[in-house]
Image: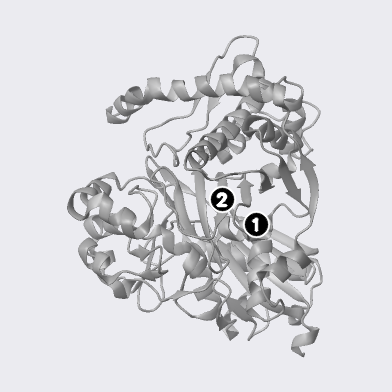
Amino acid sequence: MSQASKSLLLGVDVGTSSCKVALFDLEGTLIARSSEPYTTHYAGLCVEQDPEDWWKATKKAIKNLIEKHHIDPGKVAAIGVDGQSWAALPIDRKGRALRRAMIWLDRRSEKECRWLREEVGEKVIFEKSMNRVDPAFVIPKILWIKENEPEVFARTEKFLTSNAYINYKLTGELTQDISQGYGFYSFDMRKGKWDKNLCERMGIPLKMLPDIYPCSKVIGEVTSRAAEETGLVKGVPVVAGGLDAAAATLGAGVIEPGQVQEQGGQAGGMSICMDRPFGDPKLILGYHVVPERWLLQGGTVGGGSLRWLKGILSPSKGKEKLDPFEVMSLEAEKIKPGSDGLIFLPYMAGERSPLWDSNAKGIFFGLSYDKTRAHLIRAIMEGCAFALYHNLQVAESQGIKVKTMTSVGGAARSKVWTQIKADVTNKPILIPHYTDSAPLGAAILAGIGAGIYSDFKEAVENVVKIEEHIEPRSKFHSLYCELFEIYQNIYLKLKEDFEHLARIKL
């Protein structure tokens, strides 16, 4: 089959809760999609996933997509894989995983962070990586493995991120895309390269880190074995891919300085596109999947709070067979802005930016007998919007102007939640035609790598369409500003109690 007749692009998204695969035509129209969940293993501050579960889910999702929708795999022109951030996965010389991956939610490496601050120096690390020292990042996890599992560290050939592992299973190539480099403090944010000196100072051999590739660079082809396991055709080119949030930012059409992507899923946050690297210790800085672009990000853990609530509450009577998130949105819409004084702190797994507090906990403040399930739902939505607003305020305090945001992820499908975010932040929000934008962004990377699009601008113009424009309501923004002040004060007043609770052996 000629390259011209290969008219489909496959995006693979290795997310926190599942692997999503989506097939698009060259104009960005969704042809088919499929997803498969996997298990997250929680034990206190330890949060892990089995990389073989990632691969099994990827294989099954691709096979199901091809078989259920009667897709001719020979029409797939290229594949892009994006993945969750900050996963630390050691593999041996034969490419076998030596342990489960420590994912971004894992915060056990506080001791290693203290060592980095004291022995290497947080100022030195920030100057090079332009990111703060925190257990969420990859290097503290690697140091934890070195200290606590020396036999694993000794056998490690490479440390891989989530999408790099799936790329390896597809192509047999060990790679590191540039957008995931921000998780490593040995990554020079200005040059986009590993810093050998910092690797040595941190006691991590440079050879354990794979070579860095541009996100749209073809790094290999689907092998015979991978083709047999997935149903794909041998020889399909695979690009390096990238960070899920960065791929989602591309899938939202955010490629120019000043444009902003906002996302809500298991992980929530914002990504501000910039044409120069600019770091803030309270925020997160990384390379975009787009060349010569960086993303100043705010990352929160509260996005999964609604999923948590769904899991512990019974479905609404008479609506058991409907989509539970649609039902929750309908319920939240019945409650007036402010949730009748119920405020939620979405720190369900500590919090990332701008607090960076492993000990922080989720809080419902203002509970009373008149509060209903619907109040809890709306309060969670508002609490996650407050977390977004908190990050935006930090960015804007540095002189960065945010005019509008493009909303993607599962939460973008909820009109009430998106309206809440617009009201809380006082920013207009755009909603694209396809809100699961991470696999779309991965597919765009594949298209560029395969030479289907001449550049990112052409790709976005052809693929991304904005469908809705939601305006903030000033009268509710004023109300939310008052509640946001209380939201911040609750955390500040409880910070020492969170620390105390963490010290108690329960």
Give the percent coordinates (x, y) of residue 128.
33, 60
Tell me if mark 1 has few (under 14), some (14-19) or many (20+) residues whose alpha carbon lies within 10 angstroms of its own.
many
Query: Going by the image, does 423 lie left or right of 113?
Result: right
Does 495 appear above or below 5?
above
Q: Nearer the viewer, residue 83 or 190?
A: 190
Q: Secondary structure at mark 2?
A: strand
Q: Are marks 2 and 1 in contact (CB under 8 Å)?
A: yes
Give the percent coordinates (x, y) of residue 9.
71, 72
Give the percent coordinates (x, y) of residue 315.
71, 30
Image disc number at residue 408: none
Tell me if I can see residue 231 in this picture.
Answer: no
Q: Quadrant of the C terminus?
A: top left
**Figure coloring:** one colour
Instruction: Residue at 58% x, 44% y: name it.
Output: 401
Q: Quadrant of the N terminus?
A: bottom right
Question: Of marks 2 and 1, which one's residue comes earlier in the chain?
Answer: 1
Of all residues, the one furthest to the bottom in this rendering is 2
Q: Report the residue marked by disc 2.
A: 271
Instruction: Residue at 48% x, 80% y: name it.
Output: 173
Q: Report the residue marked by disc 1.
A: 254
Give the percent coordinates (x, y) of residue 109.
30, 48
Tell me if I can see residue 301 in this picture.
Answer: yes
Instruction: Residue at 53% x, 69% y: name it.
Output: 166
Does 227 appear above or below 278?
below
Does 216 appear above or below 354?
below
Q: Secondary structure at mark 1?
A: loop
Query: Going by the image, does 78 lie left or right of 137?
Result: right
Q: Nearer the viewer, residue 241 or 462?
A: 462
Label 2 amino acid? Ser
Instruction: Residue at 45% x, 50% y: name it.
Output: 284
Label 1 amino acid? Val
